[in-house]
Structure formats: structure tokens, C-alpha cells
Amino acid sequence: MRKKSKVDKKSFMALCESRWKEIAELSNRNNLYDLEKDFSQIWQTLGRSVLEQRVGEVPSNTRKKKPK
């Protein structure tokens, strides 16, 4: 069974803080489409990072259910 790691407030805030510069630069976008696209990409990668910290890294073979 995969070992679960705990995401505490400090590590979550550190992940958010690491993306803050990119979020702040969104105000430089010329149109709403680019702003929304880039904002969505930032949040998806941030969410993936938080989830991977919580459950562990994604295995190389995603179809494999149990590690050996």
C-alpha cells in the first residue's frame, strides 16, 4: 500500500506562494481569454502538486493498481 503523506497548512501555503508570481502577472494579459486560460493552467498544476503531496507520486504505469 502506498504511504500517504500529510499536507499541512505550512506546506500548502508554500506551494501557493511559489505560484504567486505567476498569478500576479496575470494582470498583464491583454484579453480575458488569455487570462482565463493561464489562470486555469496555474490552478490545475497547483492542484496536482497538492494532490501528489497528499497521496504520493503518480506511478509510471497508471494502470497498475498495487505496487510490488
Image (cartoon, rainbow, N blue to C red):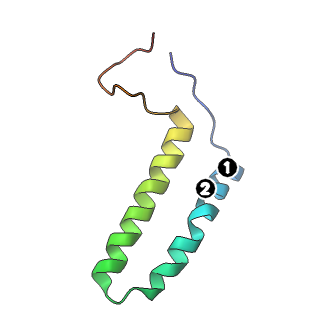
Residue 28 drawn above or below residue 9: below
Rendered image quadrant of residue 3: top right
Q: Which mark is residue 15?
A: 2
In percent of width and height, residue 63 lies at 29, 23
Q: Is residue 11 left or right of residue 28?
A: right
In percent of width and height, residue 52 lies at 50, 39
Residue 40 drawn above or below residue 26: above
Q: CA distance from mark 2 to mark 1?
A: 6 Å
Most extreme residue toward the right, as rendered? 10
Discs 2, 1 touching: Cβ within 8 Å:
yes
Q: Is residue 41 left or right of residue 3?
A: left
Residue at left offset 56%, top offset 64% = 19
Residue at left offset 43%, top offset 33% = 58
In the picture, the quarter occupied by the C terminus is top left
In percent of width and height, residue 66 lies at 40, 14
Residue at image mark 1: 11
Residue at left offset 57%, top offset 28% = 4
Rendered image quadrant of residue 41: bottom left
